Amino acid sequence: MSVLGGLAVYVTSHGYGHLNRVVAVLNCLPESIPVVIRSHRDLHNGWQERLTRPAVLEHAVWDAGAVNPPGDSNATDGPATIARAVAFHGESWPRIDAEADRLRRQATRAVLCDAPAAPLLAAARAGVPGFALANFTWAEIYAEHVDPADRAARAMLADLRAASATATAFRAQPALPLDEFRERIDVGLVVSAGRDRRGELRQRLGIGRSERIVYLYVGRYGQDDLDWRRLAGYRGVHFVGFHPPPSSVGSVANLHVVDPAEWTGATLLASADAALTKAGYGAVSEAMAARTPLIYPPRAGFAEHRALEEGLRLWGGGIPITSEQFARLDLAAALDRAFSQRPAEPPYPTDGAARIARHLATTIR
């Protein structure tokens, strides 16, 4: 497949939520528009499983993300995050002119980034319209962790903000302000709505009609210190997710693992009575779209969480628990609350992906 004259897409490897929402957009884009996706090769299987249209996959890394303490994806190690980001910035920023040359050679018509800022500056230097699909920027995430005396870190923030200032942001709600962009377009939720397959799920896993289903996702990197065995004490409740507990725990009778190639998080959310997940953008938007109550722990040191939690409060379907409750999997009160409510419609439009695809298609054509 040729990528000449089409859309170049740059996606972070910091969590699958970015991949999932970009997939939602690309699956709405006409197949006549060539697409090349530049992301870490570790994500290529995910693209192939979820895309319903052709795209060329290339290995590329254009941002450093954030660093989590070992075994805890709900916290951010600020000093380690900034140290890695500054080191990566020094390596990646000199590549921008070469990337701009490639965009010109391939007659790229538009650039879309989900999180990386550097390709937006490459697009500007190549004279190509640049767009960010975002509910946060790395400058917004890093800012609270930067020591004012750290000149290299402050220079990195300035570069990231300047790159964003060349582009237009599709602001996926709930979102941080994204003030650094020259233009912001609020698009609502950017989500691939899941299909309710609870009947099939019950039959496959042997879950009775009167028993409850809870989608369980505790982060890409897991949570090693959770009291996993406590799940067995919730009678009449079955937890379904993609990862087994640590090998030291062994099996838990009412915790079921399904194949991510066959089931997506959005589908499990649409098929469940409640969810217990880290409140990332994907889980929050998918829960809102499915109107499935979402139980979530706090997230330290990552500014995005404030915007997502505000969106959950506005919606009314979010059920916060403490870090201690999460570590102990002390869920009785939260589950009772979740099972007794049916959340309202989302407070944002749910067709954000289609809106972005239409805008991109108009720009490219």
Image (cartoon, rainbow, N blue to C red):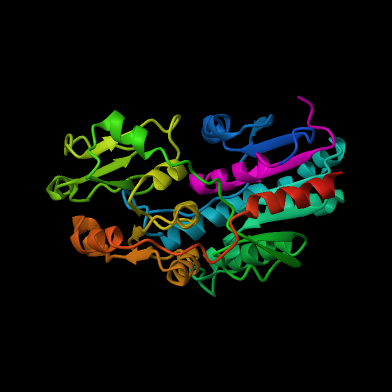
Is residue 134 positioned above or below 261 on the image? Answer: below
Decide: is 156 above or below 120. below
User: Is 16 colored magenta in this rendering?
Assistant: yes
Write the residue at 67% across / 31% down: 53
Give, as a single range, the part of the protein colored magenta.
1-28
* Furthest residue toward front: 209
The image quadrant where one finds the N terminus is: top right
Reply yes or no: does residue 215 show up in magenta: no
What count of labels does the image hold?
0
Question: Height in image: 197 above or below 326?
Answer: above
Residue 324, given in percent of the width and then of the height, sits at 22, 63
Q: Nearer the viewer, residue 31 or 181?
A: 31
Determine whether, in the image, residue 147 is placed left or right of residue 332. Answer: right
Residue sitting farthest toward the top: 1
Q: Residue at x 21, y 34 (%)?
A: 247
Q: Where is residue 261? Give x, y as percent.
A: 45, 29
Q: Seen in the image, is 200 located left or right of residue 347?
A: left
| 187 relative to 346 in the view: left or right | right
Quadrant hosting residue 55: top right
Q: Quadrant of the C terminus?
A: top right
- x, y percent for residue 158: 67, 67
In the orientation shown, which residue stands out farthest toward the left?
233
**Residue 313 occupies quadrant:** bottom left
Residue at image point 76% right, 42% down: 99
Residue 54 lies in quadrant: top right
Of 355 and 67, nearer the camera is 355
At 33% from the left and 51% from the top, the residue drawn is 273
Q: In the rendered view, does 79 fall on the left or right side of 30?
A: left
Residue 336 can be seen, yes or no = yes
In this orientation, which residue lies closer to the viewer: 330 or 69?
330
- Image coordinates of residue 358 in percent, x first then y, are 76, 49
Inspect this view and state whether residue 93 appears: no
